[in-house]
Amino acid sequence: MQNAFVPIFLLLVCTIGLAIALLLASRLLNPRRAGQVTRMPYESGMDPIHDTRRRFDVRFHLLAIAFLIFDVELLFLYPWAVIVGNGGRGAGNEGHATRVADGDPMQKATLISNPQSLSPNPSPHVPRTYFFPAMTFLLLLVVGYVYLWRKGVFRWG
Amino acid sequence: MTPLPHNVAVTKLDELVSWCRKNSLWPMPFATACCGIELMATGASRHDIARFGAEVFRFSPRQCDLMIVAGRVVMKMLPVLQRIWQQMPEPKWCISMGACCSTGGVFDTYSVVQGIDRFLPVDMYVPGCPPRPEQLIQSIIDLQEKIQREGRRKG
C-alpha cells in the first residue's frame, strides 16, 4: 500500500525533469536574438491598432446580466425539449439505434425520415408533468425580464 | 587507447543540433496564390510532408522556423512578409516556391516584387508554375542537407 504511489511520483519527477531539461537545452543551444519587431504583437504582419485592454462603459454589465437570463433559459430548455420530444423516456437514443439497426433497409429509411414512428406509443401532447414546471421556470425568468425593463436597463439615454 | 564499442557514435554538437533542426522544420505558410494550393496538397495525406518532419504548419511566426512563400508577392504585401519574417525566431530558413515568388513570373509589372530574394534571404528556390508537391518535398530534402552541412549552433 505504501509503495502504490511510487510509480506516479516517479512519473511526476521524470516529467518535470524532462520539461526542465528540454527548456534548458533550448536555452543553451539556441541563438537568442530578438529585435524590436520580434517582440511586437503578431497581427498577421499588420500594425496593431490599439491595446487589447480597452475600457468600455460600465452599463454593459447590465446587458450582460440580461443576456444571462436568456442564456440560462436556453441551457435548461434544450435538455427539456429533447426529453419531451422523446416522449419522456430520457435524452438517450440508444433504443432508437438498436431498433434502426435491426430493421431492414426500407424500414430504416422510414424510421429515419419519420422519427415519430420510433416511439412505441407516440404521444402528440406534452404531458403535464413536463409542461407546467417548464412554464413556471419561464414565468420566473419573464418576471426578472420585466423587472429589468421597468428599471430602465434598456434605456440608453 | 581502447576502440569505441560499435553502438557508440561520436559527433559534434553543431552537427547534432543541425540534425535535430533539420528533422523538425516547422513551416510558416505564406501562401498568396495558386502555389498555396500545391502547398496544401503537400501537407495532405497523398504527399504527406510529415515523412520529412515538416508537417507542423503553424499560423504564428513565433513557432516557425521555415517560411514557405508560395505565390506572387505584391509591393503592398511586402512589409507584411518582411515583418512576419522578422517575427520568426532564429534559426530560420526560407523557401521561395514557384516562379512568381522567385522571379515575379508572368507578373512582369511594377506592382509585383520581381523575386523576393531582393528583400529576404532565400535558401531554396522551387521552379514551376505552380510546382508539384514532389518538387516542394525535394526542396525540403535539399534544405535538410543544407542545414546539416552548414548549420551552426548559434545560427
Image (spheres, rainbow, N blue to C red):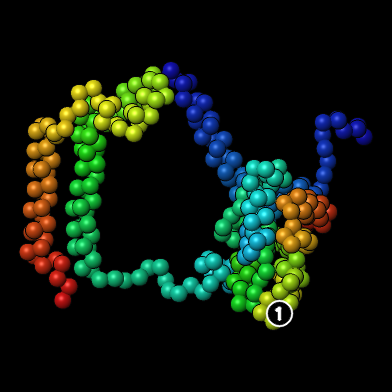
Which x, y percent locates residue B73? 66, 71
Q: Nearer the viewer, residue B37 or B146?
A: B37
Identify the residue at image location x=8%, y=38%: A132
Disc 1: which residue: B109
Confirm whether residue B44 shows in the render: yes
Identify the residue at image location x=63%, y=69%: B81
**Dividing the image into 4 quarters, which one contains the N terminus of chain B?**
top right
Identify the residue at image location x=59%, y=71%: B80
Vertical arrangement, residue A117 with respect to residue A58, above or below: above
**Dividing the image into 4 quarters, which one contains the C terminus of chain B?**
bottom right
Write down the quadrant of residue A103 in the picture: top left
Q: Nearer the viewer, residue A124 or A18?
A: A124
The residue carrying pointer 1 sits among few (fewer than 14), some (14 to 19) or many (20 or more) residues within 10 Å by Cα, namely: few
Question: Horizontally, is A136 left or right of A14 in the view?
Answer: left
Vertical arrangement, residue A16 with respect to residue B83, above or below: above
Vertical arrangement, residue A55 with respect to residue A6, above or below: below
Write down the quadrant of residue B31 in the picture: bottom right
What residue occupies the far right of the structure in this picture? B1
Identify the residue at image location x=23%, y=51%: A71
**Mark 1 falls within which chain?**
B
Question: Horizontally, is A115 left or right of B10 in the view?
Answer: left
Q: Amino acid at mark 1?
A: Thr
Q: Nearer the viewer, residue B21 or B115?
A: B115
What residue occupies the far front of the structure in this picture? A106
Which x, y percent locates residue B147? 78, 54
Confirm whether residue A34 shows in the render: no
User: Of helix, strand and loop, which one carries label 1?
Assistant: loop
Q: How many marks?
A: 1
Which x, y percent locates residue A59? 21, 68
Which x, y percent locates residue B78? 64, 74
Write down the quadrant of residue A155 in the picture: bottom left
